[in-house]
Image (cartoon, rainbow, N blue to C red):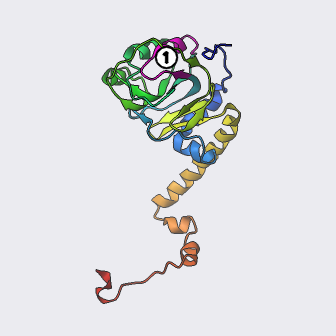
Amino acid sequence: MSAHRIVRDIDRAPVEVIDRLARAGVASVHEAAGRVGLVGPRVQARLQGAAVGGSAVTVLSHPGDNLMLHAAVEVCRPGDVLVVATTSDSTDGMFGDLLATSLRSRGVLGLVIDAGVRDIATLREMGFPVWSRAVHAQGTVKASPGSVNVPVVIAGRVIAPGDIIIADDDGVLALPIGRGAEVADAADQRLANEEAKRTALASGTLGVDLYGLRPLLADLGVEYVDRLPGNAQR
């Protein structure tokens, strides 16, 4: 078998599960999942306010070469997120508005790429969400083989084909399909708990009381004093 391959068919999580996770958002899902799954912060949102949840179609590409991104478009389905890694570090602008137009025609929701994007003003006008390592006008070629729908590493996070991708202004998170329903349930419960806490805090309850932190402060040797004597206040 060739070292380079395009896998046409992958498993995907139920849309209902993905939608619940997307509504919860990256921060809540990260906590609900046990603080796992985050892509490193060097991959950042380039369209503020965008939020997506979808299934990962992964690409492993040669740096400075977007041939395999074009090849990946054919296997994308509505609701997918294209996830692109390179075989070595790259900030080249491997993705622009023409590829975004092609992906949008397939119903792809957005792009996560551990490299650069270009034509960012047009991408923003289109409303096509991208999370990238860089914005860089450096162009690319179409010459080198790679693979589609194989495991990739994005800013320190291993992402497998079909993983659930949640992305918003807080970053990008990937979950295995098998954890989707469990984490969605935990995220729903967490959001309900947070709403109750938000109401209490808005009414004036202090966080140290809401979270029962006064005994911890005492155990750690933190003392309350009304005032420091003399020059000690300065």
Residue 132 placement, left or right of 107: left
| Image: 34 above or below 222 | above
Tally the marks: 1
Residue 86 located within the stretch drawn in magenta: no
Quadrant of the drawing holding the C terminus: bottom left
* Residue at x 50%, y 64% (from the top left corner): 207
| Image: 91 above or below 65 | below
**Furthest residue in direction bottom, as rendered:** 230
| Image: 49 above or below 227 | above
Q: Position of residue 175 (x, y in %)?
A: 62, 35
| Image: 214 above or below 61 | below
Residue 67 placement, left or right of 183: left
Residue 64 located within the stretch drawn in magenta: yes
SS at mark 1 in the image: helix
* Residue at x 66%, y 33% (from the top left corner): 176
Residue 48 appears in which quarter of the rendering? top left
Q: Nearer the viewer, residue 231 or 69?
A: 69
- Specify whether residue 70 is in view: yes
Three-letter amino acid code at the position of disc 1: Leu
Q: Position of residue 128 (x, y in %)?
A: 42, 23
- Specify whether residue 19 is in view: no
Q: Position of residue 73 (x, y in %)?
A: 52, 13
Quadrant of the drawing holding the N terminus: top right
Q: Position of residue 139 (x, y in %)?
A: 35, 18
* Residue at x 60%, y 44% (from the top left corner): 36
Give the residue number, with chain letter if any, for mark 1: 69
Q: Nearer the viewer, residue 36 or 150?
A: 150
What's drawn in magenta, residue-wise?
59-76
Q: Nearer the viewer, residue 98 or 150?
A: 150
